Image (tube, rainbow, N blue to C red):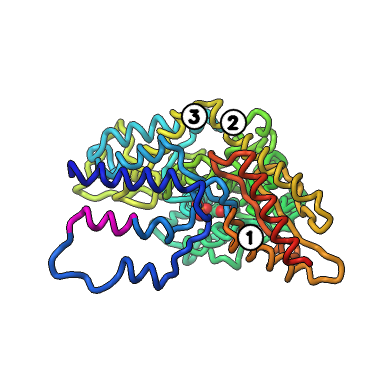
Amino acid sequence: MKDLLPRTSAHAVNYISQVADRPVKATMTSAELRATLGGALGTTGETPESIVDRLAAAATRGTVASSGPRYFGFVIGGCLPAAVAADWLVSAWDQNAGVYALSPLVSVVEDITAEWLKSLAGLPETMSVGFVTGCQMANFTALAAARHHVLREAGWDVEAQGLAGAPTVTVITSDESHYTIFMALRLLGFGAATAIRVPADAQGRMRADTIRETLAATSGPAIVCAQAGNVNTGAFDPLDHIATAVDQARQVHSRPIWLHVDGAFGLWAATSPARAHLVAGISRADSIATDGHKWLNVPYDSGIVFVAHPDAHRSAMSLSAAYIVATAVERDPHEFVPEESRRGRAVPIYAALRSLGTTGVGDLIDRCCRHAALMADLLKVHPHIRILNDVVLNQVLVRCEVPGRDADALTKAVIAGVQDEGTCWLGGTTWHGMVAMRVAVSNWSTTADDIEKSAAAILRVLEKAGS
Ligand SMILES: Cc1ncc(COP(=O)(O)O)c(C=O)c1O
């Protein structure tokens, strides 16, 4: 260990110090990776040093520089230095963060971090918080609590009785809900296709009037899934109006209705005084899902769920066994998440928050949004580029249009060309039937210079592909 960890640290420092300058794409083929990493497993073991050397050698060209400053694909954050370092400690400590008795430190860190997060996002202090693997599991956990709550109100114990014979739960999503909401509905036994999908507007925002109409046309327990931050446009559902529609339907029809908000990256707008208005009303939600590994820039895997009904949260998640040592007063982390044994994944979040401070988190969000706007400004002056969305957050949708050319094919060619050229990386999507490139700016280390270099690369590729 004495020599191994410094050696590993040197590899990591080397990787991180090169990530901004190397080609963003992976330049090693899967065959080369297999040749470097594979072969038959030896009968006798190898030295740890030779194993980390081998992994490090493959990482330089076999990884995508997705933690670097010019990676704009999907919605991918980088890694704040304090968060990477804290994550290493989590591995060194190897704590099972299931119960307080196994790791008082992680349990207390979870408590502290949960309080900080609620305060940063302006959420009620009374919300319970779970630290999960990502927003997929945050959505799942939140909707499990929702399922428990609305069915309990309808006189049904879903944890004990299952869904067969249960009162029907109406699930309302939007046309633009993220696919992980439907995955959660599948896992929870609701089925993905049973949800009523209400239409969204031109920016992908759910329409509050249609929620009102849909609630009026249905009866019994219901779950409404809204969104803060559309994965294509960055647009926010009108959360305050939706919360009011839900409140009115609860009162008029005395029915249990749960409002969930998927805020995978959009919740972080709450931390910026300039952008908090985008999430107005979010504190009225019954549950909220978000990610740490996207915009807070902590290492994978890191998601967070907030629930306004801790009893429903616990009832949906907790389990007991004779040998589990539960404490009456301290936090047993497993009560808020689907897993039992788990790593101390709140620790890197704690470190990230501590290293940024409250102002620093908002500054990070604002900086990324400014960079997204700069990218849109630099691209849209080109006569053959159209920006398809209102750039309200960190997402830009770009389409290449040359008269007489198939714009879908051209846009796809430019996306492939940019990925191949290597200055930056961005992916594609289809928005309202049109192929578009997606630029998502979520990395703490991206500078205006990175945006300028990347915009120039995109325009160079377009010039070539469009001529
Ligand atoms: C709106 C939204 N919800 C949920 C998710 C899923 O998050 P994760 O991949 O962390 O599970 C994403 C991912 O991009 C997202 O944008």
Q: Is residue 340 left or right of residue 274?
A: left
> What residue is shown at x 80% (from left), y 53% (from top)?
382
Q: Given this view, does label 1 or label 3 mark the residue nearer the observer?
A: 1
- Which circle marks residue 460 in the picture? none
Q: Earlier in the sequence, mark 1 or mark 2?
A: 2
Q: Given this view, does label 1 or label 2 mark the residue nearer the observer?
A: 1
> What residue is shown at x 52% (from left), y 59% (from top)?
25
Give yes or no for residue 98 being in the magenta stretch.
Answer: no
Give the amino acid at mark 2.
Asp
> What residue is shown at x 62% (from left), y 35% (from top)?
367
Label 3 neighbour load within 10 Å: few <14, some 14-19, many 20+: some
Task: Indicate the quadrant containing the N terminus: top left, top right, bottom left or bottom right.
Answer: top left
Q: Is residue 129 left or right of residue 85?
A: right
Label 2 neighbour load within 10 Å: few <14, some 14-19, many 20+: some
Q: Position of residue 433 (x, y in %)?
A: 75, 66
Q: Earlier in the sequence, mark 1 or mark 3?
A: 3
Residues tagged 1 and 2 counted as in contact (Cβ below 8 A): no
For mark 3, what is the residue? 356
Could you tell me which secondary element the residue under label 2 belongs to?
Answer: helix
For mark 2, what is the residue? 363
Figure quadrant of residue 397: bottom right
Residues tagged 3 and 2 counted as in contact (Cβ below 8 A): yes
Residue range in magenta is: 47-56
In front of the other: 52 or 183? 52
For mark 1, what is the residue? 418
Q: Position of residue 278 (x, y in %)?
A: 69, 38
Give the amino acid at mark 3.
Leu
Residue 451 visible? The answer is yes
Could you tell me which secondary element the residue under label 3 belongs to?
Answer: helix
